[in-house]
Image: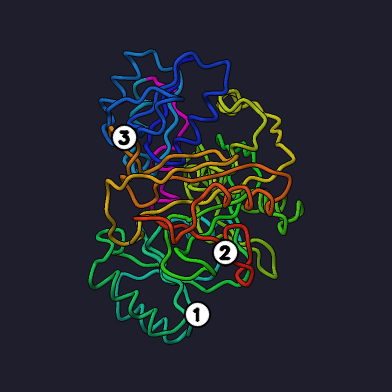
Amino acid sequence: MNVLVIGRGGREHSIVMKLSESKLIDKLFVAPGNAGMENVATCVPIEETETMKLIHFAKEHSIELTIVGPENPLLDGIANEFLAEGLSVFAPTKEAALIEGSKSFAKEIMKKYQIPTASYETFTDAEKAKAYVIEKGAPIVIKADGLAAGKGVVVAETTKQAIQAIDDMLVSKAFSEAGAKVVVEEFLMGNEFSLMAFVHGEKVCPMIPARDHKRAFDHDEGPNTGGMGAYAPVPDITEEAINYATKEILQKAASGLVAEGRSFTGILYAGLIMTAEGPKVIEFNARFGDPETQVVLPLLKNDLIQVLVDVLNDETPQLEWEEQSCLGVVLASDGYPGSYQKGVLLPNLYGESFIVYAGVDKTDNGFVSNGGRVLLVGTKSTTIENAGKLVYESLPANKDLEGFFYRTDIGKMKEDALS
């Protein structure tokens, strides 16, 4: 087969790394990709949102399957356009992808199909939202309704913080149209985890759970980011909890979308929290998570392309997983998730780890930064603790880095961070 992956980040690098192992693939392309992917796929200089150019490329190069990584093209309807041209694509239509594109829509689906989640209200009026916050008290969660690159969620520990978040979103338009509507929801206590599944209509094939670390700094401090590291599987999440989440969350969501005339094909991602009452949904995504993909796919024994073909053909792949743990740490540009400098030469990395490139470019002097999250250093080992030890041995100390930083406590509890 000739296969095209759309995207440029760490998630897409991880996907093409896994696909490159397949004996079923003749030619593997990634559009636009990044300089770090060139040894595993042919990079094509077409932007993710240039749908007609991508369709033309797929036809010209006899692409038999296209896999879409990032969320923006999904919500623009890239899958609809590919399907209309008779091209096979592993991605949800824009109607199905709305489960990620609108948090209020996702909440309505959860309410209608009795999927466990936090109680909530939706607002477009700042004063009404503030009055609700004052009535409910803190802690409370404020979410921009639309896509905000993983940064549109504020966990407000005080009423004052919540009111500020509402002003930022509804009054100051910090997230433009993404924040024209906000969801204010109950704060849930518990440990978070992510559960992704291969989905086609009502067929749901769950992967192993992962846990990412969203906050920028050690001890889960600082602003929310797109994710500073992750590990899989998650030892404190039982098989019983995974089965419950599969049946009561992923399966209900997939079946609900079919019932709504929005049948979902692709990766359905559930961001979950393990509460005293069991797993509840924090959010849904309509694609592979980032950075969870970077630690889940390396543990998959199956040929990924065969899995995707089976799912599209309504067959049930028997997923097999290595009995190991995988942990990855993100190297980010100083200042991320705020403003940061690009073009900084990457440090030398060594040890027994693999590297997944995200925001990088190539110069005569080597790789330089071209984004906030620059790369992920990961490895597999017998335990999360061992994997973490190997990864951190591959990284220079934070104090020796110029222009970059990373969290030193990925895979550890708050009180157990590395010094």
Instruction: Give residue 418's quadrant in the image.
Output: bottom right
Q: Nearer the viewer, residue 187 or 128?
A: 187
Residue 380, x across and y down, in percent: 65, 42
Vertical position of residue 213 compared to residue 2: above or below: below
Q: Position of residue 168 (x, y in %)?
A: 28, 72
Which residue is identified by label 2?
Answer: 117
- Few, some or many C-alpha atoms within 10 Å of disc 3 (few <14, some 14-19, many ≥20)? some
Residue 392 in picture, x, y percent from top left: 57, 52
Q: Position of residue 201 (x, y in %)?
A: 55, 36
Q: Is residue 340 visible?
A: yes
User: What's the mark number on residue 139?
Assistant: 1
Above or below residue 296? Residue 417 is below
| Among the two numbered marks 2 and 3 on one chain, the one whose residue lies closer to the N terminus | 2
Relative side of 237 to 31, left or right: right
Above-or-below relation of 398 to 207 = below
Residues drawn in magenta: 86-101
Assign a secondary structure to mark 1: loop
Residues at discs 1 and 2 in contact (Cβ within 8 Å)? no
Q: Disc 1 residue type?
A: Pro
Q: Amino acid at mark 3?
A: Lys
Residue 404 sits in quarter: bottom left
Q: Tell me the residue that label 3 is attached to.
A: 362
What residue is rendered at 26% in x and 32% in y? 50
Residue 383 painted magenta: no
Residue type for callout 2: Thr
